[in-house]
Image (spheres, helix red, strand yellow):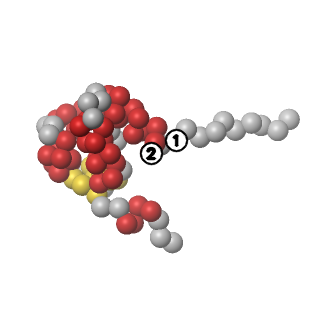
């Protein structure tokens, strides 16, 4: 089975930091704060991020959006809320 993820390039945390002009410590802090979660976390703890996700974030920053607002918007787009399940009575 082929997933959408299989065609998506992944970036290591250093590449993300460079692309966003932020420090690696900032990217790690955003991970701890649940703002910018890695798309994949390898067995050795390496964080990998989807290129399209990072490009979207960078574009929002370039439009003048704050990092927190940009990350909130991206999170909602890439991680939509599940509809509440209603139990049948």
On screen, residue 66 above or below 40: above
Q: What element carries label 1?
A: loop
Residue furthest to the bottom in view is 1
- Quadrant position of residue 63: top left
Position in image of residue 60 (x %, y %):
30, 37
**Left or right of 8 in this view: 45:** left
Q: Mark 2 points at which residue?
A: 78
Residue furthest to the front in view is 63
Name the residue located 28 percent from the left edge and 27 percent from the top edge: 66
Which of the pair 23/32 is nearer the observer? 23
Q: Residue 80 carries which label?
A: 1
**Left or right of 27 in this view: 77:** right
Position in image of residue 77 (x %, y %):
46, 42
- Quadrant position of residue 8: bottom left
Residues at badges 1 and 2 in contact (C-beta under 8 Å)? yes
Name the residue located 28 percent from the left edge and 58 percent from the top edge: 10
The reply to whether residue 38 is in sight is no
- Quadrant position of residue 21: top left
Q: Label 1 crowding class (10 Å Cα cut-off): few <14, some 14-19, many 20+? A: few
Alpha carbons under labels 1 and 2: distance apart: 6 Å
Position in image of residue 87 (x %, y %):
77, 37
């Amino acid at each position: 089975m082929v997933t959408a993820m299989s065609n998506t390039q992944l970036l290591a945390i250093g590449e993300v930091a460079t692309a966003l002009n932020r420090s690696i410590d900032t990217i790690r802090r955003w991970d701890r704060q649940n703002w910018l979660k890695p798309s994949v976390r390898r067995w050795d703890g390496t964080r990998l991020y989807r290129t399209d996700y990072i490009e979207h974030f960078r574009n929002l920053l370039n439009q003048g959006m704050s990092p927190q607002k940009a990350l909130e918007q991206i999170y909602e787009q890439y991680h939509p809320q599940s509809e509440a399940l209603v139990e049948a009575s």
